[in-house]
Amino acid sequence: MAVQQVLGGSVAWHVENDANAAAILAHHWPEVPNLGDLTAADFALVEPVDILTAGFPCQDVSEAGLGAGIAAGTRSGLWLHVARAIQSLRPSLVVIENVRGLLSAPAHSDMERCTWCVGDGGGKPAVRALGAVLADLARLGFDAEWACVRASEIGAPHRRERVFVVAWPAAEDPDLESRLERGLAASGQAARGWSWADARRRGRAPAADALGIGPRRREGPGSLAGATGTDAGEAPERHRCPSPAAAGDDASLDWGIYRGAVERWERLTRSAPRAVDDRRRLDPPFVEWMHGLDEGHVTGVPGLGRNAQLRALGNGVVVRQAEAALRLLLDRAALAPVA
């Protein structure tokens, strides 16, 4: 969704074998085929695409997981099949998203085979998961840029830090510009102002900022810090809001120290629903709102119960956050859309 917001185009196909996620995709893109199991997909037979997006499973690189990392047989090891898709399809642009744990989780790789060569040392694996992803992209002939972006940096009332990577065929590819231009022309995007060649000539122009994000400062390699305000946990409003007049009274919700963060996101999206249901459990419509999604985007999909809704949302991406990351990385790579 973020890629379409920034670059236009249409969805050619999905690869999703989780039943609940597949139901959400089918609900919103009923005419788009789902290839199902990524490990079994034959990418030599699918419709070619100009842009490939991937968010491979995060469980084994997440700080909440067991830290198995990227390796054959792990869920996060599905990255190897994403790499296989990239190798077969040779898209003009690849957009990848994963959790911040990608920066620290181990990876099984044939690079840096001795712990004293280049990496961390101390008996720990020298190659981290992000390093393995970038190395695989390089082996496939792709250049890349990456950044770690927080949802709070675009105004959301939660941190939700995520790693984003964009990759494109290395400059030695003589057909790169013409292939991208052809793909964008076919999607109608060329008429909306994108020009690959113009972006190359312009160099690193200031990032297009359609999301209203203020000036950014770098906090080390690959890191982004915004000027949109503090994280929800650092909200400056430390006073308590008025308590609800009665139980279940949504007209006067008590957000406590999070009031400023919630109100900021309400200005950017819509009014916040209640955070908990009548049984004092986290309410899926509230999580949906925290993602900045339209009401019912997940909770309105037929057949999904509360747990399935929360799981899908927990695995999802804040679209505005991904848009901001994509604009930042395209700009770094001198591939930013023409304003």
Image (cartoon, grey):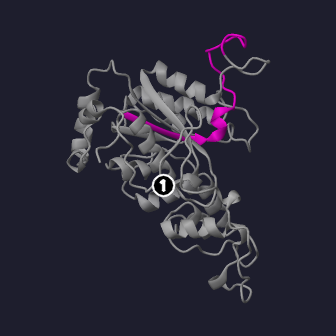
Q: In this view, does 242 lie above or below 193?
A: below
Q: Is residue 209 shown to the viewer in this render? A: yes
Task: Tell me what residue is drawn at x 43 percent, y 56 percent.
Answer: 211
**Residue 100 part of the magenta segment:** yes
Residue 195 x/y as whole percent:
25, 39
Question: Quick one: label 1, few (<14), some, or many (20+) residues within 10 Å?
Answer: many
Image height of 26 relative to 170, above or below? below
> On the picture, is 54 further left or further right than 106?
left
Asked where in the image residue 167 lies, by quadrant, the reply is: top left
- Observer-nearest residue: 245 or 32? 245
Please, what is the three-letter code of the amino acid marked with disc 1? Arg
On screen, residue 45 above or below 301: above
Question: Is residue 84 a member of the stretch shown in magenta?
Answer: no
Q: Where is residue 276 in the image (x, y as percent from the top left)?
A: 70, 73
Residue position for label 1: 320
Judge left or right: residue 310 versus residue 166.
Answer: right
Q: Position of residue 130 (x, y in %)?
A: 59, 30
Q: Which residue: 72% across, 32% down?
A: 68
Numbered-mark total: 1
Note whether residue 299 is visible. no
User: Which quarter of the figure has residue 259?
Assistant: bottom right
In the rendered image, the vertical position of residue 306 relative to residue 21, given as above or below: below
Image coordinates for residue 15, horizontal then vertical, percent: 48, 44
Which stretch is magenta? 93-118
Disc 1 secondary structure class: helix
Residue 287 relative to residue 49: left or right: right
